[in-house]
Image (cartoon, helix red, strand yellow):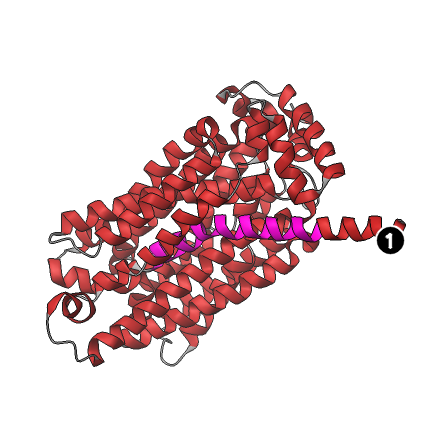
Amino acid sequence: MVNNFFSKKQAEQKAGNSFLVFIAVTASVGGFLFGYDTAVVSGTIGLVKAQFELDAIMEGWFVSSALVGCIGGVLVAGELSDRIGRKKTLILSGFLFSLSALGCMIPETHSELVFYRILGGIGVGIASILSPLYISEVSPAHLRGRMVALYQLAIAVGILSAYFTNAWLLDLGDSTDIQQGFLHEIFVEEVWRSMFGLESIPAILFFLTLFFIPESPRWLSSKDRNQEAKIILERIEGNVIADEDIRSIKSAIAKEEKGTWNILFHPGIRVAMFVGILLAILSQFTGINAIIYYGPRILEEAGLKLSEALGGQVFIGFINVVATIFTIWKIDSFGRKKLLLAGVSGMALSLTTIGILFLFNLTSGSLVLIFILVFCASFSIGFGPVVWVLLSEIYPTNVRGRAMSLATFSLWIGTAVIGQVVPWMLETLGASWTFFVFAICCIPVPFILKKIPETKGMSLEDIESVWQKDE
């Protein structure tokens, strides 16, 4: 009997883990599309700029237009997800990704291209909140860090895929014997169209698979649909733990003000809100998207040809993936704060070194690329995954979507600013001082981390209670 009992529990646990992995991976495809959509533009900038004869300001608008869409998506996603649910809002994101990817293959004017980029940006904005939030709400405490970090891994894989396909399509355009027709236009004559268009394949897959995942049990419980929530938790964690979780969730929700923004301004929660916003902004002001968007241009300034620069971007993307896998492996044992401190230290060191190399014209050879790789690896160990994990953990259930909206809104404001001003910084300040500015933005992070608890191994409800004690 005892053996049968343990065999049954093991079978339940295995099935629960498989179910959890399925829904976490499905939600993480939003991160893949986020990464691809963000990075694909790096290979198209020069081509689109030449075709539509863009000046520096319009070049910046082409890059940052999707980020404006992201901001719009962020503004609606939190409120929408708290009202209609995480799943339905994610489905909307998948639809917008698909429409944008297909639309970016066919525009005849710069304005049309910008319109479809904005649509894709709205999808990115929604996914950037809902994918990590949803994964956080379905994951057990002891696995939550690595499950949410899957989202950052998906972003890194998406970035790598964009770099790889950009380089591959550029080479294909130079070597293919397609002479005419639509295929000639999108693969040879105007290859940037196929760079954007290939995103439609994972976008449509994301949209369809979202119909097969459950709603967030914590959102269901916040709407007094506790029986539905319990059924989902039982599939993930088993009967006993599901009962405990439901009791804990109901107790935490009972202490909250029902779905109001006022919670965010309570003394303890206010600190969490402030910390989340600062970390989100600094994750962008430290320069990661300057590398993603303008990496080829920076590498060209270091003496590489465009094809070599795009190849360098592929290598950067590969390093991002490897470093993120390390973080997934260690985040639930090392903890969030330790990884973030280590990553930011590596970023500050590498950014300063790159600035010095450009300042003294020591950019020949592979030195710049090596330290860019160190910077990207450091970002993927710390800021990349850890910020998304923290933002998905530290807010109360009833307003988690709205709170993440504010923090992620700040992140995308930072991203839009970087996308717009980096061409100006490179032309006016030069590459050296551009990197020095990014290095300076690393300095506040250790001081900010002193204001938050280490959240590894804590349930979402236990984390919430820590902030409430400070009220």
Tell whether 47 sits left or right of 71.
left
Q: What residue type is labelled 1?
A: Asn
Which quarter of the figure has residue 395? top right
The residue pinned by badge 1 equals: 3
Residue at the image position 42 percent from the left and 36 percent from the top: 89
- Over which residues does the magenta segment extend? 13-39
Tell whether 28 sits left or right of 459.
left
Q: Where is residue 350 in the image (x, y as percent from the top left)?
A: 48, 65
Task: Give neighbour class at mark 1: few <14, some 14-19, many 20+ (Cα, 10 Å).
Answer: few
Name the foreground residue: 6 vs 374.
Answer: 6
Position of residue 123 relative to residue 52, above or below, is: above
Tell whether 452 sits left or right of 424.
right
Name the foreground residue: 271 vs 328.
Answer: 328
Which quarter of the figure has residue 139? top right
Q: Does the magenta stretch include residue 245?
A: no
Q: Does the magenta stretch include residue 37?
A: yes
